[in-house]
Amino acid sequence: MSRLVLTPGEFRILEGLRLNPRKSFTGRVRGERLTKRKGISIDFDDYREYSEGDDLRHLDWNVLARLEHPVVKTYRDEEDLAVHLLVDASSSMSFGEPTKLDYAKRLACAFGYVALCGGDAVYPRAIGVRQQPGSALRGRASYPRLARWTTELLPIGTQTLANEMRAFAKTGARPGLAVVITDAMDPEVASGVRILAGRGHEVCVVQTLSDLELRPDLEGDLRLLDVENEGAVEITANSITLRAYADSLAKHNQALAEECRRMGGRHTLVEVGTPLDKVVKNVLKKEGWVAA
C-alpha cells in the first residue's frame, strides 16, 4: 500500500465531490457546508484560520495584506459536518487477497479525502480497538495524517461488531455522519445501527465482502474456523449447503440494508477489489452519497 493509499488518478476522481448527508447537524466550528435549518441568515459571522483546500473566495485579502496571515470568512448559514470513519479492524477483516481490511482502508481514505476537501471534520476510528475519540482532522492538508492512520491499522480487534458500535455510541461523540466500513458479518449488526442512529448519527454502512464470501467455490468435508471467537464447525460443502449459505447471506444483507434505511441511513455492498471509479460512479453518485 502506497504512502498516500490512493493513486493520483483516484484523487482526481474524488476532486469536487462533497458528502451529501440526509440530515442536518449542528456544527461545532463554522465551516463551508450549507445547513438545511430554516431561519438562518447568510450574513457574515466570524473568521477562522485558513486550511489548505478552503474555498479561496472566502479568503479575506485585506487581512492577509495587513497581517500576512490567511483567514477565511464564515457565514451564519455554514456549519461543519462531523464525519466519523468507523473502520472494522476485527480479525475477520484479514480474510481475502487483498484483505477486506486493506480494501476498507482505501474506502476510508476516499471518504475522508472528500470530507476534508469539503471542509468537514473527520474523526477516524478503528472499530474493534477500544479508544477515546481523537481530535478532528480538518482541511486537505490533513489527508496525509489520515493515510498514515490507515496504513498503521492492523486487524487486532476481538469484540463483535455490534458491541463495538455500542461502545462507540457511549463515547458521546458529537452526532454526525457515521460511515461504517465493515464486512458486517455479525448477526447483531442491525442492533448496532439502531443504537448509533438513536444517538443522533446518520449511519452509512459500506459492506465489503470478498469474492469467495460472495461466491464460495468449495466442496467436500470442511472444518470452518471462526477467527474471532476461535470456534469451529464441520460441514460438507455441496450444492445444497452452498445454496443455503447464499440464501442466508442474502437475507442477512437485506435485513441490514432495510434497517439502515429505516433509521434514515444508507447501506451498500461492495466486493473487495472493485475499482474506486466504479464505486464512485455506480454507488456514491448514483445513490446520492456524494454530490458534485
Image: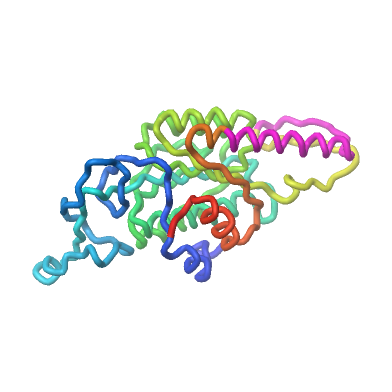
Q: Nearer the viewer, residue 229 or 32?
A: 32
Which quadrant holds the C terminus? bottom left
Q: Nearer the viewer, residue 152 or 234?
A: 234
- Res. 113 visible in picture: no
Query: Residue shown at 44%/54% (left/top)?
Result: 112
The image quadrant of residue 27 is top left
Image coords of residue 221 (percent x, y): 89, 37
> In the image, which residues are magenta?
229-258
Count of number-bearing discs = 0
Image coords of residue 29 (percent x, y): 25, 47
The image quadrant of residue 144 is bottom left
Q: Is residue 228 magenta?
A: no
Q: Nearer the viewer, residue 223 or 60?
A: 60
Image coords of residue 161 (percent x, y): 57, 34
Query: Residue shown at 65%/41% (left/top)?
Result: 92
Query: Residue shown at 59%/38% (left/top)?
Result: 257
Q: Nearer the viewer, residue 152 or 89?
A: 89
Query: What scheme was used to colour the molecule?
Result: rainbow
Residue 283 vs 40, above or below: the answer is: below
Q: Main secondary structure of the magenta part?
A: helix
- Res. 165 visible in picture: yes
Q: Is residue 71 left or right of residue 19?
A: left
Which quadrant holds the N terminus? bottom right
Residue lying at the far left of the rendered structure:
66
Q: Is residue 70 left or right of residue 12?
A: left
Query: Residue shown at 85%/38% (left/top)?
Result: 222
The image quadrant of residue 280 is bottom right
